[in-house]
Image: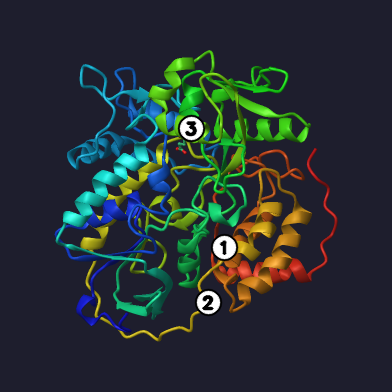
Amino acid sequence: MTADLIHLDGRPVIIGGGLAGLMTALSLAPEPVILITKAPLGEQASSSWAQGGLAAALGNDDDPALHLADTLAAGDGLCDEAAARAIVEAAPEAIAALDRRGVRFDRSGDGRFELGREAAHSRRRIIHAEGDGTGRELMRALIAAVRRSPSITIIEGLEARRLLVEDGAIAGVLAQSNAGIAHFSTGRVVLATGGLGGLFFETTNPMGNFGQGLALAARAGAALADLEFIQFHPTALDGPSRPMQLISEAVRGEGATLVDETGHRFMSDVPGAELAPRDVVARAIWRHLADGHKVFLDARHSLGPRFAARFPSITAFCQASGLDPAAEPLPVKPAVHYHMGGIAVDAAGRSSVPGLWALGEVASTGLHGANRLASNSLTEAVVCAKQVAESLSGSPRTKIRRAKIADLPPLPDASAVRPIVSQSLGLMRDGPALRQAITELLPLAHSNSAAADPALVGLMIAVAALRREESRGGHYRTDFPLPAATARRATVRLDEAFAQARELTETPRPVRKAQS
Ligand code: SIN
């Protein structure tokens, strides 16, 4: 690898090869762009694994206003209503754009989209492909489109390590491959790096995704928002596979129920039952497991022999584990699935650092609030790709500046951080465990080791979780089990997080009376 890729200087650099990165690169055409991904396109991207689909108000009984109402209700008071409205209103056009790019969505005999149902949606509004293979089909069509596009220079096997900043603005990207370090001089960078499930032992995300984009943005000085809100999917297959296999919420949307080892349907008294918002279902399962029960998803009566046709991928991995979803209940438990928090961005995807845009799971637009409504995230990525592309191509070209090249620690490895984060930032949190995590993560985050970037991400989340003394959506504090009277979003920068972490770990804290 050459130290300088001079001939590419000045081109926007898109970091991340999932749905968000691909759609941004395509939306920028014919402007020449560079797309860098640490894995070959389509691999190690959560988008490829998406089962459910994309939410959009396309049914005869539906309307974007109803989609918005469901989004705000699930978001538990923390959505940015204007941002959410703009995204759900643009959702039908986003589906049309994917259709034009060759994505083969499932359609009924009359040619209309088949619409699935997922938790906390008041209507059937999930557009899907290959039954439960939506992500695979999306990525197939878009990777082909990106590879055909002459304006997109794809560099696979290259991991972004640092954003270079001069005078407070983006000046370049340092990236690394087996062949060495690559330096891109550019004033325009888009982060589309996905989520952070790999910080946890039990996740449905690729294990290598530890929040790289958050670390890059934080080190560049960007504000991050609502970091404490992590979504646990209620129904990961409870088996030895890591990452865990997801059993789509669409299975419950088709009528499957949650039962324990006695056959008791323990969610039946909860409003919405199995289709209550995801955080509610995940905590109910967690509590039932903590009480010593086993929990199963039972699709025998609702789907039975129809299961395999509607959910072929789930059927395949269940069968590989010796389970038959049509004939027996499937053991399930919650697992980390999605990060609602992220790089704080405006409606055009601009972060607080000039020259840095972000979209997809790594960004926080305000759509998801405290708890993401199922299948809103792929939709958000497609809608925001267009907005980011428009904003970026309308932004002035900055003079190429030669930034100082930073020393790089070894390639990141989250294994030292996973036990700390899994212990303290799970479904149930409390002050003492968060403080302990901060104490352990702070020296790692300051180190020059492979743990530094994952620890920095875990530390910022732990600080945000400790500061939020309430329970709301995906953030539940056993020492503060009630929501605060006023919902407020919260942002943090790296220097503030470090200062607060030092203060929290150095200052003895008075004992506070917990809420009852
Ligand atoms: C699922 O299929 O249950 C996941 C959908 C999503 O996370 O949006």
- Give how far apart the Cα atoms at labels 2 and 3 are: 36 Å
The numbered mark at residue 248 is 3
Indicate the secondary structure of the residue bearing disc 2: loop
| Left or right, residue 323 beside residue 422 | left
The kind of residue tagged 3 is Ser
The kind of residue tagged 2 is Pro
Q: Residue at x 61, y 33 (%)?
A: 332
| Left or right, residue 376 beside residue 41 | right
Q: Relative to 140, does residue 192 appear above or below in the rendering? A: below
The kind of residue tagged 1 is Val
The numbered mark at residue 410 is 2
- Give how far apart the Cα atoms at labels 3 and 1 are: 28 Å
Query: Which residue is denoted by mark 1 in the rendering?
Result: 457
Q: Relative to 247, does residue 12 appear above or below in the rendering? A: below
Disc 1 + disc 2, Cβ < 8 Å: no
Where residue 261 sits, quadrant-wise, is: top right
Indicate the secondary structure of the residue bearing disc 1: helix
Colouring: rainbow
The numbered mark at residue 120 is none
Frontmost residue, 314 versus 361:
314
- Give how far apart the Cα atoms at labels 1 and 2 are: 16 Å
Disc 3 + disc 1, Cβ < 8 Å: no
The answer to which of marks 1 and 2 sits earlier in the sequence is 2
Single out the mark in the foreground, 3 or 1: 3
| Left or right, residue 136 beside residue 472 | left
The residue positioned farthest toward the right in the image shown: 511
Single out the mark in the foreground, 1 or 2: 2
Instruction: Judge the density around disc 2: few (<14), some (14-19), many (≥20) Cα neighbours within 10 Å.
Output: few
Q: Residue at x 42, y 43 (%)?
A: 49
Where residue 310 sits, quadrant-wise, is: top left
